[in-house]
Image: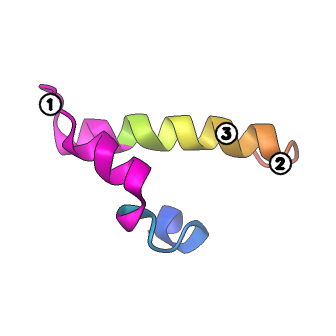
Amino acid sequence: MRYGLMFPDFHRDDAFVSWMTRPVDDSPEQRFKDYRSVMRFVWKLKNATWN
């Protein structure tokens, strides 16, 4: 829920939809965790104060 509050409508973003629908054997939960990890890294690059 926190992710949705920080990034409203993230689940409609083209990059997210592409990531979640790519042909892999990972579960949707694992794909979301991977995507969230990448987005946290990007967020930290843009906002050096966020932990």
Which residue carries the number 1 mark?
23
- The alpha-carbon separation of the residues under discs 1 and 3 comes to 24 Å
If you read the primary sequence from the N terminus, does the residue marked by circle 1 or circle 2 appear first?
A: 1
Query: How many numbered tags mark residues here?
Result: 3
Along the viewing direction, whichever of 7 and 49 lies nearer the viewer? 7
**Left or right: where does residue 1 sit relative to residue 20?**
right
- Magenta-colored segment: predominant secondary structure: helix
- The alpha-carbon separation of the residues under discs 3 and 2 comes to 9 Å
If you read the primary sequence from the N terminus, does the residue marked by circle 1 or circle 3 appear first?
A: 1
Mark 3 crowdedness (10 Å alpha carbons): few <14, some 14-19, many ≥20: few
The image quadrant where one finds the N terminus is: bottom left
* Furthest residue toward front: 14
Under circle 1, the secondary element is loop
Rendered position, 47 above or below 7: above
Which residue carries the number 3 mark?
42
Instruction: Report the amino acid beneath label 2.
Output: Asn
Instruction: Report the amino acid beneath label 1.
Output: Pro
Which residue carries the number 2 mark?
47
Rendered position, 46 above or below 24: below
How is the protein colored in the picture?
rainbow
Q: Position of residue 36 (x, y in %)?
A: 47, 44
Under circle 3, the secondary element is helix
Instruction: Report the amino acid beneath label 3.
Output: Val
If you read the primary sequence from the N terminus, does the residue marked by circle 3 or circle 2 appear first?
A: 3
Circles 1 and 2 in contact, beta carbons < 8 Å? no
Q: Position of residue 48 (x, y in %)?
A: 86, 42
- The alpha-carbon separation of the residues under discs 1 and 2 comes to 32 Å
Rendered position, 11 above or below 23: below
**Residues drawn in magenta:** 12-32
Which residue is painted at 36% across and 63% down in the image? 11
